[in-house]
Amino acid sequence: MTQISRRSLLKTGAAAGVLAATGMPLRAQAKKGGRLRLGLAGANTSDSWDGRTHSDSFMIMAAHGCVFDCLTEVGADGQLKGELAESWEASADAKTWTFKLRQGVTFHNGKAFGADDVIASLGMHTEEGAKSAAKPIVSSISEMKKINDHEIELTLAAGNADFPFLLSDYHILMFPAGQIEEAIAKGIGTGMYEVVSFDPGVRFVGKRVASHYKDGSAGWFDEVEAIAINDSSARMNALMTGQVDAVNRVDVKTEALLKANPAVNIFEVTGNQHYTFPMLTGTDPYSNISVRKALKHAINREELVEKILQGHGKVANDHPIGPANQYYAADLEQNSYDPDKAKFYLKEAGMDSLSVDLSAANAAFSGAIDAAQLYQASAKAAGININVVQEPDDGYWSNVWLKKPWCACYWSGRATEDWMFSTAYESGVPWNDTNWENARFQELLLTARAELDSSKRRDMYTEMQMLMSSEGGTVIPMYANYVDAHSTKLTNSGTIGNVFQMDSSRMMERWWFA
């Protein structure tokens, strides 16, 4: 497990900060050669090289960290480093950011990379009619200014000390200005691998670019191949029979079979993915803080980790900041399974018992119905009757989530605390699935976002986690690990990234054949 961390953004207490790019030392045996074959879930026939639309693992892996680059990158060790940006400098209020761009970089079609490409690539996400998952990030930029061919200035509407982290988002790929449509059609980026062939929803093949700026530090395979295998059983079988070298999303039910194969290794990391039961706090009885506290003490978290995740995860504490976040507050008092304490809070709410509906479908997360039924069983000892409503998988996110008073849900987490909190818990945002209002929490959210002093930010984010854990409107019982597997022929630096699955979705660039 690694932790995402930010270096200090301040040169001095009052001056602007600079975060420079650094590389990670690699094992001495790192060597070039061979063709990596990945069997991947998450492929669709609608897949394309348009980064704005990427939402599942196949295209995320084929694009960022392979065919395309971003301005910044979260390294396997969790440190933020430059990709196409060499360094960046912030104003004292974290509103104005100046990025120095890497020189001597070319797109796969020979066009030189520069400031115009950055401005055009960012502008894609806010143009009329664009359906981009990164639009909220880019919309925060009020002005983009080209200083010279290799330096740009981005001014934000409000200060954000996390801004360089947000530019590592896998949607925000760099395209050649004036050639964006062609680049989307053909997959023209600046990454270590250029496209040889691409059949959406079926297969992608790429070959290593000669004389790339990352030579010697990444991109060890001569060729990479991503094969769409959405069926879990077929994917595991492909690895065990040597048809592919690695697979994502291991079916934990087959773990024993995989471990029995001496040619296969399972690798997993604890990231920020978490499973939740959000309540709409504007609806009774969830508007009552004592009811919410009772429900938090009526769930057996250890049992869910054991039976739903089969041990591939860890207990969570009713806030969304995970072990891969820098300011994860691991030492907060744990909300534990305690039927007597749950009864105490029910009595505080003026109740002797409680009957509530909990909507669930396995569309929410794998095993969600079973998890809800385990919750139902553990809550009985506290005098809480949970009626599990088994909803249809089809239409769950449009008909149940954000609409039913209490339901099952999941979040992959975000690389920074502000990113996670502002996506799901800031007042008025579309994906706020609890509508929990706490004046102190909202005040801290805005203040911490612009604070450059790391110790002060830690204190603020710790308080926010504490407020959510004790008073918030969601039960978050567990973090779910990323579980993947590979042939023993493959190796890596010894540190595996945990922002996303498959070494933060950068396995093609970071691994090699032993």
Image (spheres, rainbow, N blue to C red):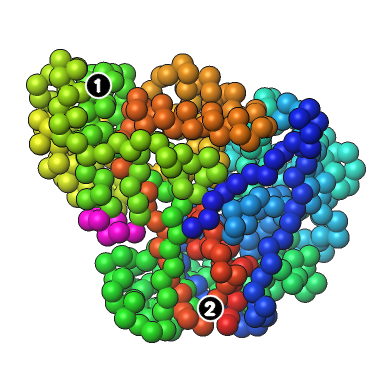
Q: Position of residue 506 (x, y in %)?
A: 58, 62
Residue in front for this viewpoint, 272 or 334: 334
Q: Residue at x 71, y 45 (%)?
A: 121
Q: Nearer the viewer, residue 283 or 202?
A: 283
Instruction: Decide whether the magenta segment is chiefly helix, strand or loop.
Output: loop
* Mark 1 or 2: the one toward you: 1
Q: Position of residue 150 (x, y in %)?
A: 86, 48
Viewer-side residue, 324 vs 258: 324
Local packing at callout 1 (Cα closer than 10 Å; few below 14, some 14-19, many 20+) is many
Magenta stretch contains residue 400:
no
Which of pointers 1 and 2 lies earlier in the amino acid sequence? 1
**Is residue 310 rendered magenta in the image?**
yes
**Residues packed near mark 2 inside 10 Å, few (<14), some (14 to 19) or many (20 plus):** some
Judging by the rendered image, the residue that carries numbered circle 2 is 490
Tell me: residue 112, above or below residue 7: below
**Label 1, on which residue?**
290
Is 355 situated left or right of 482 in this image?
left
For the point 68% across and 63% down, the residue is 24
Label 2: which secondary element? strand
Question: Three-letter amino acid code at disc 1?
Answer: Ser
Chain part drawn in magenta: 306-312
Q: Is residue 74 above or below residue 406?
A: below
Q: Separation of disc 1 and disc 2 at Cα?
A: 52 Å
Amino acid type, residue under disc 2 in the picture: Leu
- The x and y percentages for residue 492 are 57, 72
Residue 91 appears in the picture as rendered? no
Q: Is residue 149 left or right of residue 301?
A: right
Q: Secondary structure at mark 1?
A: helix
Q: To which quarter of the image does residue 32 belong?
A: bottom right
Q: Residue furthest right?
A: 148
Q: Does residue 225 appear in the picture of this structure?
A: yes
